[in-house]
Image: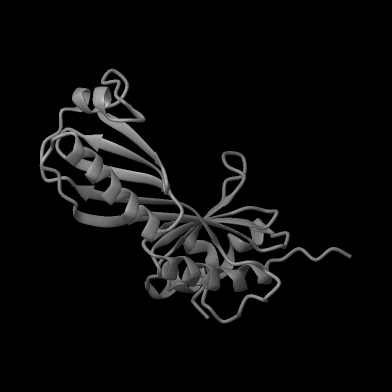
Amino acid sequence: MPATRSSQQANGSQPSQAATPSTVTPSSVEGPIVRNVVSTFNLACRVDLQHVAQHARNATYNPQRFSAAILRIRDPKSTALVFSTGKVVVTGSRSEDDSRLAGRKFARTLQRLGYAAHFREWKLQNMVSSADSQMLIRLEGLSSGAHFPFCRYEPEIFPGLVYRMESPGVVLLVFAKGKVVITGAKSMAEVQQAWNNIYPALRLYQIVRE
């Protein structure tokens, strides 16, 4: 077990990760579901955003509001933020493969408009997922003791508990009704690892109704 806050202060050591995958989630509890994938890539050419907005389908550009042109496709359902430097941010996909495929489609759209566009330096930046522990959680308990170094819980400001996990390096939003949002993961494996890590802690602070 990791040291508590008091013992860590006494020996001057840094806190270790509190939640560990010591308990396998039961089959009745559904695992995390990916809600959004954010990725980036480089077209390796400069882009005239006004030209793109005028000639590409489902494209908008309002430089007074945002410095990128916005492109949308339906399959896979995704949105691209295209900057004049050639940098592109892809959001809205539901998997790593779909995000990569969407990026390639956006690059081809620019090619059809006459740009010497490439699909380079693709990188998954963030995978946002959610899960339901199917438990009521005592957030005050979770935010104390061994888990204190990783938690921030200020119910007067935000109803959820913010849990900053060290390994993997993700942030979890834990709510009293058992819902959990996982952000900052770079792969589905990290999402699953984070869920396996936090679930034993949620069970430990489960509210059991009489």
Q: How many marks can you see?
A: 0
Q: Quadrant of the C terminus?
A: bottom right
Q: Can you tell which quarter of the image residue 179 is in?
A: bottom right
- Measuring from the top left, give residue 157's x and y in whole percent: 57, 39
Up-down relation of residue 12 to residue 143 (above or below): below
Q: Residue at x 15, y 28 (%)?
A: 48
Q: Residue at x 32, y 32 (%)?
A: 70
Q: Residue at x 47, y 72 (%)?
A: 193
Please state which of residues 64 and 194 is positioned toward the viewer in this rendering. Answer: 64
Q: Residue at x 49, y 76 (%)?
A: 3
Please state which of residues 87 and 209 is positioned toward the viewer in this rendering. Answer: 87
Up-down relation of residue 192 to residue 72 (above or below): below
Please state which of residues 118 and 167 is positioned toward the viewer in this rendering. Answer: 118
- Measuring from the top left, give residue 155's x and y in whole percent: 62, 44
The answer to whether residue 33 is left or right of residue 30 is left
The answer to whether residue 163 is left or right of residue 115 is right
Up-down relation of residue 123 to residue 72 (above or below): below
